[in-house]
Amino acid sequence: MQTYDFIIVGSGSAGSVVAGRLSASGRFSVLVLEAGGTDQRFYVQMPLGYGKTFFDPAVNWNYKAEPDPGLGGNADHWPRGKLLGGSSSINAMVFIRGAREDFDAWASAGNPGWSYDDLLPAFKALEDNEAGADQWRGTGGPLHVTDCSRAVHPLTKRYLAAGEQAGLPFNPDFNGASQEGVGVYQITTKNGRRMSAARAFLRPAMKRGNVRVETKALATRILFEGKRAVGVEYEQNGEKKTARAGREVILSGGSINSPQLLQLSGVGPAALLGDLGISVVHANGNVGANLQDHVGINYTFKGKLPTLNQTLRPWWGKLLVGMQYILTRSGPLSLSMNNAGGFFRTDPSMTRPNMQLYFQAFSTVIPKSGERPILTPDPWPGFSIGLSNCRPSSRGEVMIRSNNPRDYPRITANAYSTNADVDEMLAAVKFVRKIAAMPAMAEIIEEEVLPGPSIRSDADLIQDFRKRSGTVYHPVSTCRMGPDAARAVVDPRLRVHGLEGLRVIDASIFPDNITGNTNAASILTGWRGADLVLEDHK
């Protein structure tokens, strides 16, 4: 059995950062265990290639949530990255930090060091923003952020104008002074290639002699001596192996895998573990509980002007954009499908936006079975305005089904399970229609295709968004942070309550969800978590 100072389980958005920062001084040895394989794949590196990875079991856990009454009984597809870089290697690359108030609320809940002002220096230090540095943004950091304002589809300008006509300000930077408004999304790419956490943080670390990365290595159990974590048991190529941690075991498996591994190791709800024949090391009913996720829906329109459908549907169009990408690393394949978006409040009395917008200059009303919709656009000029809630009050859970590490856990999302979530989504979809009715958009819309003009009453709108909504892939809070061991899994230094030598550093520690895409805050969590580890091991 080999011994390392630190064992990191998971090489995703946070784990890659932790590995990079813990190894940088050369003082510590680091083992990274990744259940998946390499990120050196064409469709991972090509930004729009995430359409090809959406169902690919070679790089994707392909989880499925339980049938959800709130979603009309649908069982939602939950992709999660199973490769170096984790979900940062298969996501839509939109770089949104979250609102100042989100992080200030974390700190106010008893988590010192997690306020916006505490975290802003780290956010600035980790990024290399193409738009330049200012009091909010940084340059020179490991993570390159691309300014897409000159590369988006021409229809995007009409969407932005319509948003302003509907009363939203134009916002040049959602990570700047304010979040509210409409604008073009910045994305994590560099020179036309995806800038995953693995590319930014882990690959440089892998060149160091004190870092070992094991792929196809499924962590099956944390090893304890009493209440102290001392190592990890894992399976690789059909062989059971163990590695020992001289200082700490760090879980960075994300909001599904981290609570799953804790439960498999005897840390979690005592009754559940007892029923599955797992010896309880430390009982904590919060492990896997408090699941929060953003839920979204698209409104789709047939347009009078060309959209990306006319480019990406025919074989010759695919050939042209493919050649453009290969030769110049530019064009539609170098971007996210979410060209633009925004944030708004369904109630003006709110202190910060509670809804996020997405504009996509393509449509997929007629998807092929088993295929990510963006791969087959509709045969007519279509586009979509999507939205998702930012801080829903519905709560779900992630719980293991058995003591077999290869059995997927039970994901119960409980979407739209509160009246507040239903009410705000109803107001939000009405606002999407308001944007579409503004002159800049209305004059180029032939018809609303989904849900269609017959869906008018509140009851019909609610039934429609229950039936057509789904996760936008931002699960958090299943190992939530907090000072009270009776309500949280980790303390403000990300140490697991009641245990020693064990931390969780990933999006599962979020006390509550944030306003926007979760990847930037996951990377930030890795950066902040590494700082805490380094402070404790001087």
Image (cartoon, helix red, strand yellow):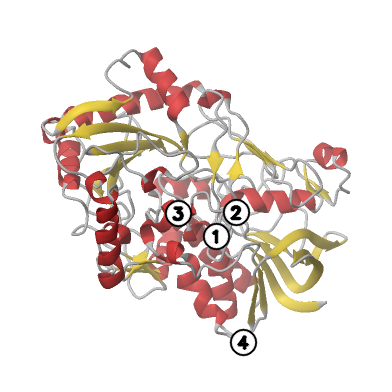
Residue under pointer 3: 52
The one of 205 and 245 positioned closer to us in this rendering = 205
- Specify whether 71 is left or right of 314: right
Image x and y of residue 517, in percent: 42, 49
Q: CA distance from mark 3 to mark 2?
A: 22 Å
Residue under pointer 1: 86
Q: What amino acid is at disc 3?
A: Lys
The one of 146 and 351 positioned closer to us in this rendering = 146
Q: CA distance from mark 2 to mark 1?
A: 9 Å
Q: Quadrant of the C terminus?
A: bottom right
Q: Residues within 10 Å of mark 4 (few under 14, many from 20)?
A: few
Mark 3–mark 1 contact, CB under 8 Å?
A: no
Q: What amino acid is at disc 1?
A: Gly
- On screen, residue 8 above or below 148: below
First-in-chain label (3 vs 2): 3
- On screen, residue 281 above or below 305: below
- On screen, residue 428 above or below 59: above
First-in-chain label (3 vs 1): 3
Q: CA distance from mark 4 to mark 1?
A: 23 Å
Residue at (59% x, 75% y) in the render? 22
Q: CA distance from mark 3 to mark 4?
A: 34 Å
Mark 4–mark 1 contact, CB under 8 Å?
A: no
- Specify whether 117 is left or right of 60: left
- Specify whether 138 is left or right of 39: left
Q: Quadrant of residue 353?
A: top left
- Specify whether 297 is left or right of 7: left
Residue under pointer 2: 254
Q: What amino acid is at disc 4?
A: Gly
Q: Which mark is residue 209?
A: 4
